[in-house]
Image (cartoon, helix red, strand yellow):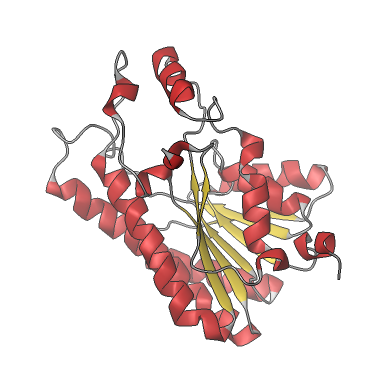
């Protein structure tokens, strides 16, 4: 098998939570589809997932939209049953959803312990349940790849200077969730490695989403590559970790940050 063959995802089934999202969730799904996988995107909005799946199908890809609320264990279990019934297996699980409840914004001064409890109940519990429900199927089939989407802010803290001149604030619950995700991934890698299941993280840098000019300018000056993350920048990482090209890679946190964390 050539190295290019190892990067191919033909014959593999991949599920991406929030894979139709307006930020890089849709890029993750698109990258996996372009590599040949059957892709399933799932989140609270069935309509959004089906619409995005239809866009991918129109381009010749095998794409499907389902519904799942990651804060509801019964919804996650129902998603698992749908996936296994329809596709017979799951080879790749990409956890990119965050359970935002409308109270996630604001800085340290305005957040409360209740915000942390909600993050734990939603984001941590949702990630835990997604892995808990789908890993047994991966073990039974002899392998699989779990890819959790963390962040640079799971590795380093925020630079408050980036936000000067804007009303933007980074909530501390985000750092809390993303840092915990990285070490949970390492736990899964160690616990299931001998059963053929790999677990890795991707930690993207700041994604350009029309932020205020002062923020974009300061961010771009600080990052070695000189710009914010774009749609095409994360595709290669997710395809690599999903594919046989990374067969000996597990427990790793792959920084896709333009060099942000190297200084």
| Residue displayed at 36% across by 43% down | 153
In depth, the one of 175 and 16 nearer the eye is: 175
Position of the C terminus, as image quadrant, is top left
Asked if residue 50 lies left or right of residue 212, the reply is right
Position of the N terminus, as image quadrant, is bottom right
| Residue displayed at 16% across by 49% down | 114
Residue 59 picture location, percent across and down:
82, 43
Residue 5 picture location, percent across and down:
83, 64
Residue 76 picture location, percent across and down:
46, 66
Residue 45's place in the image compared with 164, above or below, is below
Residue 113's place in the image compared with 187, above or below, is above
Q: Residue 105 sits in which quadrant? A: top left
In depth, the one of 216 and 52 nearer the eye is: 216
| Residue displayed at 34% across by 44% down | 156
Across the whole image, how many numbered discs are drawn on residues?
0
Q: Residue 52 sits in which quadrant? A: top right
The answer to whether residue 132 is visible is no
The answer to whether residue 124 is visible is yes
| Residue displayed at 44% across by 81% down | 191
């Amino acid at each position: 098998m050539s190295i290019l063959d190892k990067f191919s995802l033909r014959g593999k089934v991949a599920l991406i939570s929030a894979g139709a999202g307006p930020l890089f969730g849709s890029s993750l799904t698109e990258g996996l589809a372009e590599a040949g996988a059957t892709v399933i995107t799932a989140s609270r909005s069935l309509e959004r997932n089906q619409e995005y799946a239809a866009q991918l199908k129109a381009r010749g890809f095998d794409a499907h939209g389902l519904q799942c609320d990651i804060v509801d264990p019964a919804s996650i279990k129902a998603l698992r049953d749908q996936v296994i019934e329809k596709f017979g297996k799951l080879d790749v699980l990409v956890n990119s959803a965050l359970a935002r409840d409308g109270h996630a914004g604001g800085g340290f001064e305005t957040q409360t312990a209740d915000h942390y409890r909600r993050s734990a109940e939603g984001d941590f519990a949702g990630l835990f349940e997604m892995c808990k429900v789908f890993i047994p199927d991966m073990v039974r089939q002899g392998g699989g790849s779990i890819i959790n989407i963390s962040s640079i802010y799971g590795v380093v803290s925020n630079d408050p200077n980036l936000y000067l001149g804007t009303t933007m604030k980074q909530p501390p619950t985000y750092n809390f969730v993303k840092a915990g995700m990285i070490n949970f991934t390492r736990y899964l890698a160690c616990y299931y490695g001998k059963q053929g299941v790999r677990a890795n993280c991707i930690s993207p840098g700041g994604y350009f989403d029309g932020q205020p000019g002062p923020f974009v300018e300061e961010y771009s000056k600080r990052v070695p590559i000189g710009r914010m993350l774009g749609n095409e920048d994360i595709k290669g990482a997710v395809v690599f970790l999903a594919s046989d090209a990374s067969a000996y890679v597990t427990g790793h946190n792959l920084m896709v940050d333009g060099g942000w964390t190297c200084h």
